[in-house]
Amino acid sequence: MSKTFDRFAGIAFLLIGLLFIIESQRISQSSYGSAVGPDIFPIGLGAVLVLLSLRLLYETFRYQSDTQKGELILYKKFLVIFISALLYAALLEPLGYVITTFAFLLVAFQTMERGKWIKSIVIAGLFSFGVYYFFAEFLGGSLPGFPVFL
Amino acid sequence: MNTIQFLMDGFSIAFQWQNILFAFVGVLIGTAVGVLPGIGPMSGVALLIPVTATLTAGLPTEAAAASSIILLAGVYYGAMYGGSTTSILLNTPGESSSVVTTLDGYQMAKQGRAGSALSIAAIGSFAAGIISLIGLVLLAEPLSNVALQFGPAEYFSLMLLGLAAVSGLAGKSMTKALMMTVFGLMLGTIGIDAVSGIARFTYDIPVLYSGLEFLTIAVGLFALGEVFKTVLERDHEDGTMAKIGRILPTRKDLKESAAPIMRGSFLGFFIGVLPGAGATLASFFSYIGEKKFSKTPEQFGKGAIAGVAGPEAANNAASGGAMIPLLTLGIPGSGTTAILMGALIMYNIQPGPLLFDDHPEVAWGLIASMFVGNLMLLVLNMPLVKVFAKIIQTPKKYLLPIIIAISFFGVYAVQYTTFDLYLLLACGVLGYLLTRNDFPVAPLVLALVLGPMIENNMRRALTISNGDFSTFVTNPISLALLIVAAAWLLVPLLLKLKGRSVVLNEEG
């Protein structure tokens, strides 16, 4: 566990808790005629989260930070895959399922390990076409297939 | 109608051709999920929910729910069978519930007895599966009858107990586990309030009105979180795989493992029924127990067959036992059962005491299909274990991107919004960061599923009592449940203060 992360998480959750309490005040009163409106539960939760976050912050001052784990962190690979996943999400509707899935898989396969283009293309192609035809054509599900202009 | 009759009706549903197929696909995928390190039963079940939702789209709601839950439960208990394969052959557990199986299983494989270890694991799992199902059949009616007497105050306390149990045993820090629970409950309040119809925390964003979809969050936190972890932290390369050899166990092996299997089954079943304690804990206790019972405890760790048979039986029995609180009380005891419950709710079927009255075909169909599924698993895991062992060699570079693509497909096919895809990715990053820093995510998912129900019951109880909070402690059953919940959180704390090491359930 990392002390910095725990402190950061403690503060972040503290703020979330506070925000919840404040924002709960703005929930409109119900006409339901009960003393227990829709705001009681969120306010209570916010308060508990604030207390727990304080407790976590207190704990971070008590324990010794562990030595760094000697793991190799491959940020670059992750960022490429994550950004292509974001693009995949953004382009899924305009470009359709088959093209975006194929492109995403190809990029991701090549990021994981370069080379063997033909195998990557075949697997990406089989997956994107296979899922689309099985789901949209065979099962009658609905997926944006291809862009409108094709 | 009596239990036998209900069970027979259940079998007539389980033997419909599409349900046999669903059970088969479920246990097949479950075994694969169990074999593949990196995908646990939780992500496996979560990923398959959208697929089953489409597969059953043409059926009437109840039949669709029965078929889906048959498949999804198959994945759950199928994973318990598959998890042992990698433990024995590679010394890497496929699931956290088969960690202890590595101790003796891998030693047996090194001595050339891999086949015996695998087949004993399968036989033990089968026996345990059947025993826990008989327990489920016997306990289902009486327990749901008790639960029918419960009012909103009792329900509120019971669910609080469920949350306390899972948080108390999850992860290294209870503060963090409780924070995750509360955060999950908070996420559950987003959307239109079911009681008053007032929108909460939606800020006029249309996609938020229906609340955050639990499926998106579960898939993101578990499946994507795990994928991101493997991408970021290169795992050490897989070791060499042991040869399997002859599959049938010798008569001596069978004789030595019969008693551990029986003990493991009963122990696992009762641990499984308890909320919070799951298959991992059950297999762990069974191993310790077998070592105590054994006449030759020095053999343990060097390839004792009892050290494989007992824990494998226990983890399977626990997965059967865990179905009891889910089906009869409507309270999931673990992350995976929380996801199963979410799946049932998606079909507008509320697990709980009324399930056996309102939707007998779902409840009994599921129970009957679990008998069928366990039989299929025995067949799959004995002769075909060599085929499954091949799955282990699926290269990660193809597997990981495909898991991302399946998650995208699954979420989009159910939700049809790009918002959910972004939420999915965000949850993936969050899941990775939280898990890496010992914030357990299973309580979050459990809280997200239970949150709306807890709130509704709390408000109903308070409405009945005119806003008097003492209703929760003046009601005897509710008070007892609250005391147990408090004890669940306090006892581990006290033990820790005394310097005792506390067994943790990392399965989720």
Image (tube, coloured by chain):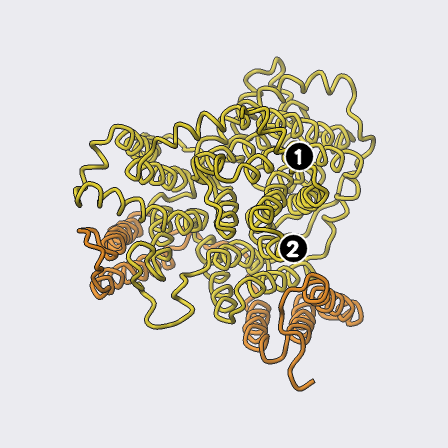
Chain colours: A orange, B yellow
Q: Are marks 1 and 2 on the same chain?
A: yes
Q: CA distance from mark 1 to mark 2?
A: 21 Å
Name the quarter where the C terminus of chain A is drawn.
bottom right
Choose top left, top right, bottom left or bottom right for residue B253: top right
Total marks shown come to: 2
The residue lying at 70 percent from left, 40 percent from top is: B16
- Of residues B494 and B459, the one nearer the viewer is B459
Check disc 1: other Cα within 10 Å, few if <14, some if 14-19, many if 20+: some
Quadrant for residue B258, please give it.
top right
Marks 1 and 2 close (CB-CB < 8 Å): no
Q: Earlier in the sequence, mark 1 or mark 2?
A: 1
Report the chain holding disc 1. Answer: B
The circle drawn on residue B55 is 2
Q: Between residues A34 and B41, which one lies in front from this camera angle?
A: A34
**Secondary-structure class at tag 2:** helix
Going by the numbered disc 2, the residue's amino acid type is Leu
**Which residue bears the numbered disc 1?**
B12
Label 1 sits on a secondary structure element that is helix
Residue at x 45%, y 47% (from the top left corner): B442
For mark 2, does the 10 Å Cα neighbourhood hold few (<14), some (14 to 19), or many (20 or more) residues?
Answer: some
Give percent across and percent down for residue A41.
26, 52
